[in-house]
Image (cartoon, rainbow, N blue to C red):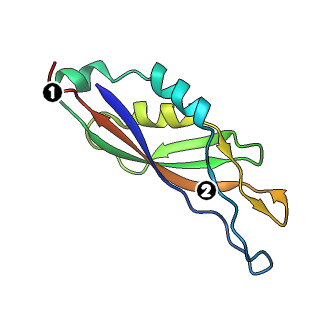
Amino acid sequence: MRLALLLLLFAPSTAAQPSISFVGFNAAEMREALAEAVYPEDAREAGIQGDVLVLFVADTTGRIIRAVPARRRGGLEEAAAALVRQMRIIPPRIGGVPAELRSQVVVRFTLDESR
C-alpha cells in the first residue's frame, strides 16, 4: 500500500505584488503524516485505489483549517481529507505579510499489487 500527494497549489495574486513566493507543504510534516497514514481497510479489501482531490483552506500560520473532498466516489475521500488536515503549509506572502490560502491537493491511494 502506498499513499502519495500530488501538489496543485496556486498562490494568491495581486496587482501590487508582482512576484510570487514558493508555496508548499512542510516536507518533514508531510513525510511524518504519510508514514502514519492508514489505508482504509474496507477500501483495501475491495481493491479500491485512485486519486482523491481535496480542497483546503490554510490560515496565515500555515495550519489547515478546512479540508473537504471535491466529490464523493469510492470510499477513500474521508481518509484523504483527514490526511490533508494533518498537513501544514508554508503560507504565501503578499507584500511580505503571510496570507490565507485556498487551494487543492491530490492524494493518491495505490495498492501494492505484489502483496
The local secondary structure at tag 2 comes to strand
For the point 52% across and 37% down, which residue is it? Answer: 84
> How would you rate the neighbour count of disc 2 (Cα within 10 Å): few for under 14, some for 14-19, many for 20 or more?
some
Q: Residue furthest bottom?
A: 15
Q: Which mark is residue 102?
A: 2
Q: Amino acid at mark 2?
A: Arg
Please tell me how many numbered marks the rendered image carries: 2
Q: Are marks 1 and 2 in contact (CB under 8 Å)?
A: no
Q: Is residue 19 left or right of residue 39?
A: right
Q: Is residue 3 left or right of residue 13?
A: left
For the point 37% across and 32% down, which residue is it? Answer: 3
Query: Which image quarter is the C terminus in?
Result: top left
- In the image, residue 81 above or below residue 69: above
Query: Which image quarter is the N terminus in?
Result: top left
For the point 72% across and 72% down, which residue is it? Answer: 19
> How would you rate the neighbour count of disc 1 (Cα within 10 Å): few for under 14, some for 14-19, many for 20 or more?
few
Residue 91 percent location from the top left of the image: 71, 50
Residue 64 percent location from the top left of the image: 64, 40
Q: Which mark is first along the chain, 2 or 1? A: 2
For the point 42% across and 36% down, which residue is it? Answer: 80
Q: Which residue is mark 1?
A: 113
How much space separates mark 1 and mark 2, taking CA atoms?
35 Å
The image quarter containing residue 66 is top right
- In the image, residue 95 above or below residue 1: below
- In the image, residue 95 above or below residue 62: below
The local secondary structure at tag 1 comes to loop
